[in-house]
Image (cartoon, rainbow, N blue to C red):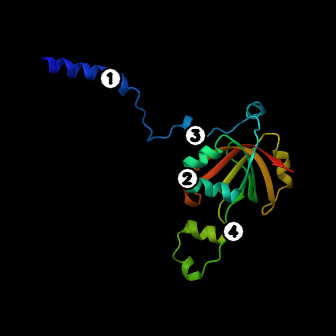
Amino acid sequence: MHRLISSWLIVLLALPLLGCIEDFSRIRETDMPRIAVNDREVAMTSPLPADRFNARALWDHYGVSVLQADLDCKGKTLRVSGIVRSVATDDRHRAYIGFQVFEPAKVPASRLRTMSAKEKTWIQEGYPPLVICYLVPTEPSKLATLKKGQTVQLLGRCLGRVKDPSGFKDYVVVLDSCRLEE
């Protein structure tokens, strides 16, 4: 009888703990990095002293250790320099600059035949942008002056690594509230 009571007591004490267990295997929209949409949100993200990275070093840092890179970069204001791969707007009409991380590679035709369609496109047309910088709403007017292949420097808040199956190694690094440095 004593054993039965102690078993029930343990179960009753453990029940509240079961409600505290969270399922970390599924990503929720609220867990995704949030991109500032208007000037008011941008003003709330005050620039702190900026760490300097080139786009390749930032992307590599996230490739080596996401946890360490998040500790070093996520939520912080970074000064990122690199070669412009693309200047565009996304499906929500937010302007962004995509940095080139890799130089186009030369591959023998025999090797090219063995590659997937995605890899062939990367070799022939260049890798997709792997560091994406969303501009503050007041900056798109400066986009007209930018050209593919130009080297620029941006100051923005790092949102971290985001899964992207279309990118090399299936991820990109995203920054928001970015301003062009002159």
Q: Which element carries disc 2, helix, strand or loop?
A: loop
- Location of the N terminus (image quadrant): top left
Q: Earlier in the sequence, mark 3 or mark 2?
A: 3
Q: Which residue is mark 4?
A: 103
Q: CA gap, disc 1 to disc 4?
A: 56 Å
In the rendered structure, the answer to whether residue 65 lies left or right of residue 82 reads: left
Q: Which element carries disc 4, helix, strand or loop?
A: loop
- Residue situated in front as seen by the camera: 11 or 31: 11
Q: CA gap, disc 4 to disc 3?
A: 29 Å
Q: Which residue is mark 1?
A: 15
Q: Is residue 145 visible?
A: yes
Q: CA gap, disc 3 to disc 1?
A: 30 Å
Q: Which residue is mark 3?
A: 32
Q: Are marks 4 and 3 in contact (CB under 8 Å)?
A: no
Q: Earlier in the sequence, mark 4 or mark 2?
A: 2
Q: Earlier in the sequence, mark 4 or mark 3?
A: 3
Q: Residue at x 64, y 56 (%)?
A: 59
Task: Residue 60 in the image: state x and y as whole percent.
Answer: 62, 58
